[in-house]
Amino acid sequence: MAQRRALQVCPTPGCPTLTAQGRCASCQASASSMRGSARAKGYDSRWERTREAYLRANPYCACDGCLLLPALLRPVATEVNHIDGLGPNGPRGHDWTNLQAMTKAHHSRHTAREQPGGWNDRER
């Protein structure tokens, strides 16, 4: 028999709606529309070409932890980090000196730490 969860108040400040889990449908839709699409943030075909070329030239993770490892022991990078944190629409969005190859896990951890007020702000 499946356990039933108690309803909880939507975590959006000021929203009194009870939900089974996470945000209510209205707040979720509102948050999604405010974020904007990946394309609007510059993650378009031009970025994909830059990303692919950068990863071909820099195939291994270059995060701070992995740089301490010998080159042959570094994991393969699958994502590209913008060092300035501004993404492809920033003034140096496609400048290779502003890019850093990373694994998915290392990029997610880095982003969580670096974004002000980000989803992982409590670990600081």
Image: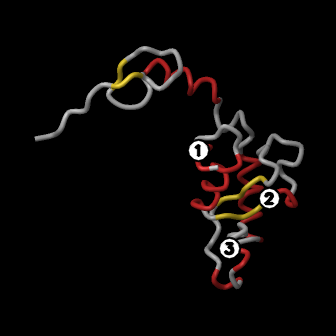
The mark that comes first in sequence, 1 or 3, is 3
Instruction: Classify mark 2: residues with Cα within 10 Å, few (<14), some (14-19) or many (20+).
Output: many
Q: Secondary structure at mark 1?
A: helix
Q: Earlier in the sequence, mark 2 or mark 1?
A: 2
Mark 2 — residue? 99
Q: Quadrant of residue 115?
A: top right
**Residue on which disc 3 sits:** 66
Q: Distance of mark 1 from mark 3, alpha carbons? A: 24 Å
Judged left or right of residue 93, residue 42 is left
Callout 3 amino acid? Cys
Callouts 1 and 3 close, C-beta under 8 Å:
no
Q: Please determine whether, in this image, residue 38 is positioned above or below residue 98.
A: above
Quarter of the picture containing the N terminus is top left
Where residue 124 appears, as percent x and y from the top left, is: 64, 49
Q: CA distance from mark 3 to mark 2?
A: 15 Å
Which numbered disc, 2 or 1, marks the residue closer to the eye? 1
